[in-house]
Amino acid sequence: MNSVADVWETVLSQLRRDLSETTMAAWFDELEPVDIQGNVFLLHCSNDFKRGYVQSLYAERIKTALRDLFSTDFDLRILDDGAFQELRGGTACRGNGRFTSEEFTFESFVVGPSNRLAYAASVAVAEHPAQNYNPLLIYGDSGLGKTHLINAIANVIRKNDPRSKIVYAKGDDMINELVEAIREGSTAEMREKYRAADLLLVDDVQFIAGKKQIQEEFFHTFNTLYESGRQIVLTSDRPPSEMTMLENRLRTRFEWGLLVDVEPPDFETRLAIVKNKSAALGISLPDSAASYIAENVTANVRQLEGTINKIQAYKSILGSDADEETVNLAMRDILKHSSEYIPTPEAILDYISKYYSVEESVIRGQQRVRDAVIARQIAMYLIRSITNLSLEDIGRIFDNRDHSTVHYSINQVEAKMKKDPAFAEMVKALKTNINSRH
């Protein structure tokens, strides 16, 4: 095959046949293909917990997929940051054990109506950090290019000033890091790392909402960086106004600078992405095939690029041309999911839990805290409208409540949707996002 990335994309495609998208997103999103050394497949994962979990529960599945692909047995090794850096024999831009990627540049980002403002703001921040928009917060659904843009910012700033201290972290990793720092008594070192940054990039910052101690730490880190004229760039899946568990003092600070959203790309932008990705991989894709992909893969940029990666994989494995048959083969799983996918109650609860930053056990349980009640009622409403489960079945999911309680909760949501257009739009957006998460 052309690259270890092609191999990994093929392995992931096989894993998706047996594992849910929730599982794939939860445990495989931070795994990065590194190399194949003999019969050892190397991955890198900065998150210690996820690395251990994947190694213990999914290593055999990965090795089976590799054996199916190459008709020979493989061992699997998942590197931590130290082993990865030693293997590469160089330095990396680090933050919370994560690396920014030099592959993401502004030149390789396809600009369209859905992301033009976010692109322009990112370029302005990269060229003049802490002078134009500070903080810059980019929000939107997953797979639309937010991470690409913040990595591109880092790459420009690093190029312009190689001495810049750039720290990149994900919101959920910051929480894990704080817990570990408290356990080891190293919170001072953690604070120093973040507060010494010239550029702080935080992906999926919504995950810190509702976590009192990490919000406290982040508040003081934010103030330190902002007051000393250093740039902060954040991404999230929604604007601060919709992060119901976020402290007001953080919400106002997030809104100090510039909020920009990215939306799903239109057809012309999707077509340009398909052609750019194909050219980058050296694939000669007929215009009719490129248009077919752009018309049918509409959810996000990641799916578009994944389709081209699969075409490349089939081309490398089977020696196939990028013809109609190969394109159909590469798109088969996506089109199948598009027509057959119905979110499970568990998937709906998982999304609502993350959206409201309320634990699933609390949503299912009896607590009457306001955010828990709202999240519970909306979850019941969405499970009813998406899965069409009976009221009795839904009640069993929520701590064995009776059907009248479920009926009341659903009525409450419907009544509020009629009275409050903004609330209705929010619920509709939740439903759309849940249906498109496959």
Image (spheres, grey):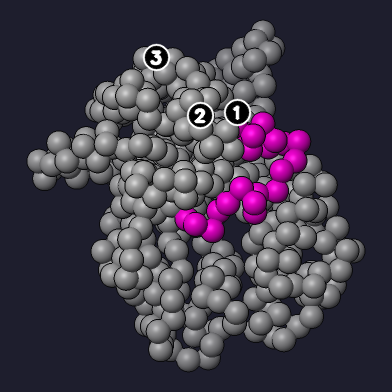
According to the image, label 2 marks what residue? Answer: 136
**Residue 174 percent location from the top left of the image:** 31, 40
In the orientation shown, which residue stands out farthest toward the top? 419
Residue 287 shows up from this direction: yes
According to the image, label 3 marks what residue? Answer: 248
Q: What residue type is labelled 2?
A: Leu
Q: What residue type is labelled 3?
A: Asn
Q: Nearer the viewer, mark 2 or mark 3?
A: 2
Q: Look at the picture and state if 270 lies above or below 387.
A: below
**Residue 407 percent location from the top left of the image:** 57, 22
**Magenta stretch: dominant secondary structure:** loop
- Asked if residue 118 is among those painted magenta in the image, a careful observer would answer yes
Q: Look at the picture and state if 237 lies above or below 132.
A: below
According to the image, label 1 marks what residue? Answer: 260
Residue depicted at 46% across the width and 38% down the height:
204
Picture quarter with the N terminus: bottom right
Range of residues picked out in magenta:
101-121
Q: Which amino acid does label 1 sit on?
A: Val
Q: What element carries label 2?
A: strand
Between 433 and 251, the one lying in front of the other is 251
How packed is label 2: few (under 14 Cα within 10 Å), some, or many (20 or more)? many
Residue 382 shows up from this direction: no
Mark nearer the N terminus (2 vs 1): 2
